[in-house]
Amino acid sequence: MVLQSILLCLILGLSAPLMAEIYKYRAPDGSIHFTDSPMGSRYRLLWRSGPSTKSAYSGTQFRKNKSRITPLIDATAKRVRLHPGLLHAMVMVESAYNPKARSKKGAEGLMQLMPQTASRYGVEDAYDPRQNLDGGARYLKDLLKEFEFNLKLALAAYNAGENAVKKYGNQIPPYPETQNYVQKVMGHYLKNKQVMVN
């Protein structure tokens, strides 16, 4: 009986899906580096596998979704009066342009809206790109106003909640996930602004 239990655990362990990511970085000298532990926003996600909502999400599907969703993002940004590069950065970090993305915590869609946030902004279907973008963009705009247009604090609040930012004296909370999130979004945003100018 003990042996059977051990074998069952081994089989289940071997069959359990593993989470893996590979990132790519091109150095100033032109050399290309690959890693599963990115150090900063210069690293680009190349491949992901495993049980997350972004798994089995090919580069081809990513490009198709980005192309299809870009006009919606740009139109939403214009309507809500946000920089389109900022919304693109958030969608990239939140869902990699996957409108069907769902986190372990229950955040849904392109901008990973939690159910209570979706309800607050009248989003009936968080997997509908138009509704999700509208709700997420209006939420971000409200956070910008609340934190006196300090973008980093607004992003931190989007990730960790307004109360978390206030709890730490209107500073980015000392949560690795939130700090990493702000860094990633800012990195993509700055890159997007440069691309849009050129």
Image: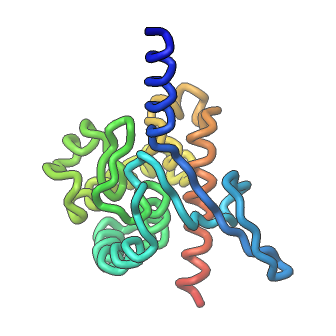
Residue at image point 51% right, 28% down: 10
Give left or right: position of 135 versus 12: left
For this orientation, the residue located farthest to the right is 29
Residue at image point 63% right, 53% down: 183
Residue at image point 51% right, 58% down: 48
Observer-nearest of 13 and 165: 13
Where does residue 36 sit, x and y in percent of width and height?
A: 67, 54
Observer-nearest of 123 and 82: 123
Q: Looking at the figure, which quarter contains the N terminus?
A: top left
Give left or right: position of 99 versus 153: left
Colour convention of the picture: rainbow
Q: Looking at the figure, which quarter contains the C terminus?
A: bottom right
Residue at image point 34% right, 73% down: 65
For this orientation, the residue located farthest to the top is 1
Give left or right: position of 91 versus 196: left
**Image quarter for residue 184?**
bottom right
Where does residue 170 sit, x and y in percent of width and height?
A: 58, 35
Observer-nearest of 94 and 37: 37
Where does residue 45 sit, x and y in percent of width and height?
A: 58, 64
Residue 78 seen by the camera:
no
Residue 158 seen by the camera:
yes
For this orientation, the residue located farthest to the left is 124
Where does residue 42 sit, x and y in percent of width and height?
A: 69, 66
